[in-house]
Image (cartoon, rainbow, N blue to C red):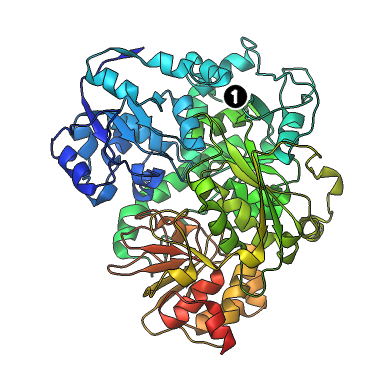
Amino acid sequence: MSMKLSGRILWLAEDPDLVRRQIEGEDLDATGATPPALHYGVNTDLMISGAACTLGYTPEILGPHFLENFKEVVPEDGVRAGGFQVVVAGDAYGSGSSREVAVVAHQGAGIELVVARSFQRIFQENMVYSGLPFTTDFGVVDRLRAGEEVDVNALFDDLPPFFRDVARSGGLLDYGTRLLAGEIAPPRPEHAPGPMTCIEKIVAARTYTGEGRPLGVPRVVPGDQVLARTGFRGMHEYTGGMVMDMYRRKWGDAPIADPETVAAFEDHFVLLDRPTVPERVRLARGAPARRLRDEMIEACRQAGIRVHGPGQPHEAGVCHRIVVERYAVPGEVVVLTDSHTPTAGVLNAFAFGVGSSAMAFALRTNLVPVTVPKTVRVWVTGSPQGVLSPKDLILHIIGDPYFREEHWRSSPTDTCVVQFGGPGLDAWSVDELSVLTNMTVEGGLMTGIVEPCDAVRTFLAERRGSSMDARFVAPDEGATYVRTLEIDLADVPLTVATPGDSRNRKPLSEVGDVPIHNVVIASCTGGSLADLRAAARILRDHPVREGVRLTVTPSSQAVAEAAEREGLLALFRDRGADVTPPGCGSCIGNGPGVPRDGETTASTTNRNFDRRMGAPGPVYLVSPAVAAASAVTGRLTDPRDLLAG
């Protein structure tokens, strides 16, 4: 397949005026060799908003909303109507959500090629699996501008062998059909045995080698591509309908492989009808969200997939929290159609997010493609000494230039994970440690995993009735790490992420005087029982400042019940908080906590992209203790200032 430039090139510049001028019809005098300063981390929320995602998942529906409100200058249908054919961007293109609709939105807007300095893992996979050509070679831009006809198939030829096979098969689902028919063999690395990291050992043990053959290979190394047997698969209402539609179109009524290890979750829309959600949000998102929910539930009913949610047969809550409570097992591969699937890595599992194509493939085959990642080992020592939390630690880590600038990367398709270990982790529970693994994805990483430790054993004994010692996977002596970071907790400051990206780290002490009007204590990184206890410790002796709005959302039904028994929810209600049922709404603008005009927000969620929470306005990511202290003073506040008093 070849491509010639018949449309325009859209440079996603850092300067909003340059973007506006292009949308209004001007073609920039820029080249691949001399591009303008390009926006860092064009994320999937910017590509297609959470609101637009409720409308459907086809190119016709999503195309007009591609990049809508980017830099506050792109109007609805601005890209498609502008006749753009190529998008050019900076580093970390495709940060954020696993939503494959971001790729669909490109295609619906007429984009035939994406050029960027680097791509984030899930988005890059979604492009491969959906057939959207991409490259990190800016010289391609100049070739197109010179009138050359570019063979875009050759761009796929530069990819690793498995990605090439998928592209040549017409996409991942067509590849799956050929695999099931025995027309192609799965990739099978052949390395001599040797020491491996935690995730390398899990992947090696779970590598599919062919029908009728035993699972596993002696060793895998970074860069290998394999198909790995999954231990758990899941999806939620934003993605479930799309996944099942893809499945039916490709395989009809063919049965799902091992349906007992699959679950669907109604969690992203369950708080939309709360009276404290702005009316404009309820009106815009309510009806289409209900359609997506109903589509997922009906498809799951027909396929025999269990469903979690309010009024459903299984308990409600944020999918990531429920997976930790009920499903994830040490040493297994866990995948969901959500970028925050790494939460389950806290249980010594290999847990990562995938797009809709990969999930449809996994439902049919019980396999998931894996590019074996490089590993950074983070060895934690010292004591948190009071209010320092894993949220502070992970914001400190992912904001480091090593991760922010992806110094671990040596090729466009590299992936990387963090393996957490060390005695410093012993101070925290699984609730708290899960924040570390959850937010690795915010640092452009595939996932995180916690080495075997007592906190995980205790959690599993209490929740599952067994410590599961035999299932734990420890790293081998002599395993290869791309880097080892030794972090003494005494050297980690209380840390915030300033607006725009979770990697925008700053010590709280250096942020300055920031007024706060809206405080959200919620989500898979801020709604656990440990999080609610940390906030209650501050609010027990201090009222919320007049004029500050406070939203509190437990992350699961089990958390809500425990917090109610302990009197935590009663305390929050007494302080004037909007205490909601379990759900995921605030994080993605589908619930209470949507910023009002002129408000600045302090949130315990994991993502602070522009408009991510449903409206413009700066969002600072903070720990639960900092959030509660900020609710008390109406300013970003060190909780130790209140505890000392």
Pick the front one: 324 or 31: 31
Q: Residue at x 83, y 56 (%)?
A: 465
In the image, residue 290 lies at what x, y percent?
Answer: 42, 50
Q: Is residue 240 above or below residue 603?
A: above
> Which residue is at the far right?
470
> Which residue is at the far bottom?
645
* Quadrant containing the C terminus in the rendered view: bottom right
| Left or right: residue 26 compared with residue 635 | left
Q: Residue at x 69, y 28 (%)?
A: 221
> Which residue is at the far left?
25
Residue matched to label 1: 254
Mark 1 neighbour density, 10 Å: few (under 14) some (14–19) many (20 or more): few
Q: Amino acid at mark 1?
A: Ala
Q: Is residue 96 above or below residue 622?
A: above
In the image, residue 204 lies at what x, y percent?
Answer: 74, 29
In the image, residue 76 lies at what x, y percent?
Answer: 22, 44
Q: Residue at x 53, y 58 (%)?
A: 395
